[in-house]
Image (cartoon, coloured by chain):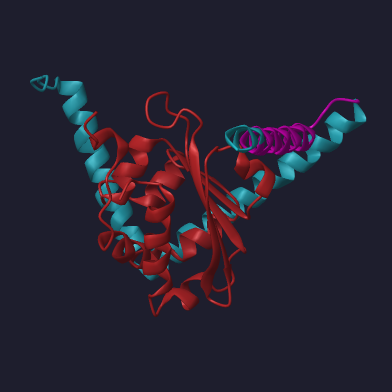
Chain colours: A cyan, B red
Amino acid sequence: MSERKKGMPEALLEQGVRAATRAARVVLDDPRGQEVLAAAVGAAQKGKRKVEEVQGRVMHAAGLPTKGDYEDVAKSMARLKRKLRDLARQVDEERKR
Amino acid sequence: MRFASAEWIEAVVRGVNGHPDLARAIAGLGSDLAAVVERDPVHFPHGVAAWGRQEGGRIVEWRALEDEDDVLELEPAYVVRAPLGLWKELLTGKADPVQAALSGRVKVKGDLEGLVRRAGYRYIVEEALRRVDTVFPDEVKR
């Protein structure tokens, strides 16, 4: 399949992405840049965690399940799924004997 | 070696463990990490994942997980999640892991700050990967 010729907006976007990538590369290759970026990421993550904590408390107070509750259910489901898979394998092996 | 197979993971872990800078790179990080290839109807209908645990400056335990949901049960300190195409870009050097994580293309659960701080050590994984002959499932002729 031949490559479709890119239009002006796509070409501009591609150039922009390339320029942004080069700029980010410069920041990341410099240890000071890395430190600044890491601190910013850390602050953003802490902020997000705080919001989630407050959100969780509000949801619990309203008698609604929180993100953590959903995660607990997902974990139990995953365990059950793995156990079923292990059991199915054991049954298959028994049958082969 | 087929990407994400047990023998491929073992080869990468061996390469990473053999690097003299590894202990310095992972000091202070969480104990375990899972790298997840998201569900893909053609190549990985259940997803696939690699899990590893570090102790004393090296990876002491690892496992290939045949279903990405197995990660939920393990609850690792870090979960790095991306589709096959993006893993391929990251592993072949076409995409930058830090940029991919910051832009949300790669989903990272856990202390991203700690990972960004250690971005300068990514050559350890890159060198290990270079030594492993990786065959991606979309390159295998059916």
Question: Residues in magenta?
Answer: A63-90
Q: Quadrant of residue B43?
A: top left
Taking the spot 31% from the left edge, 61% from the top edge, the residue there is B126
Taking depth in this image into account, of A74 and A58 the one nearest to the observer is: A74
Query: From the viewer's perspective, is residue B63 above or below residue A12?
Result: below
Taking the spot 46% from the left edge, 66% from the top edge, the residue there is B118
Taking the spot 61% from the left edge, 49% from the top edge, the residue there is A45
Taking the spot 24% from the left edge, 30% from the top edge, the residue there is A13
Query: From the viewer's perspective, is residue A23 above or below residue A81?
Result: below
Q: Is residue B40 magenta?
A: no
The quarter of the picture where the C terminus of chain A appears is: top right
- Coordinates of residue A24 in the picture (x, y in percent): 33, 52
Magenta residues: mostly which secondary structure?
helix
The quarter of the picture where the N terminus of chain A appears is: top left
Query: From the viewer's perspective, is residue B27 above or below residue B81?
Result: below
- Coordinates of residue A10 in the picture (x, y in percent): 20, 24
Number of disc labels: 0
Furthest-front residue in this view? A97
Taking depth in this image into account, of A91 and B142 the one nearest to the observer is: A91
Q: Is residue A73 magenta?
A: yes
- Coordinates of residue A6 in the picture (x, y in percent): 13, 22
Query: From the viewer's perspective, is residue B130 above or below residue A63?
Result: below
Taking depth in this image into account, of B113 and B32 the one nearest to the observer is: B32
Taking depth in this image into account, of B21 and B39 the one nearest to the observer is: B39
Q: Is residue B89 left or right of residue B13?
A: left
Q: Is residue B112 left or right of residue A22?
A: right
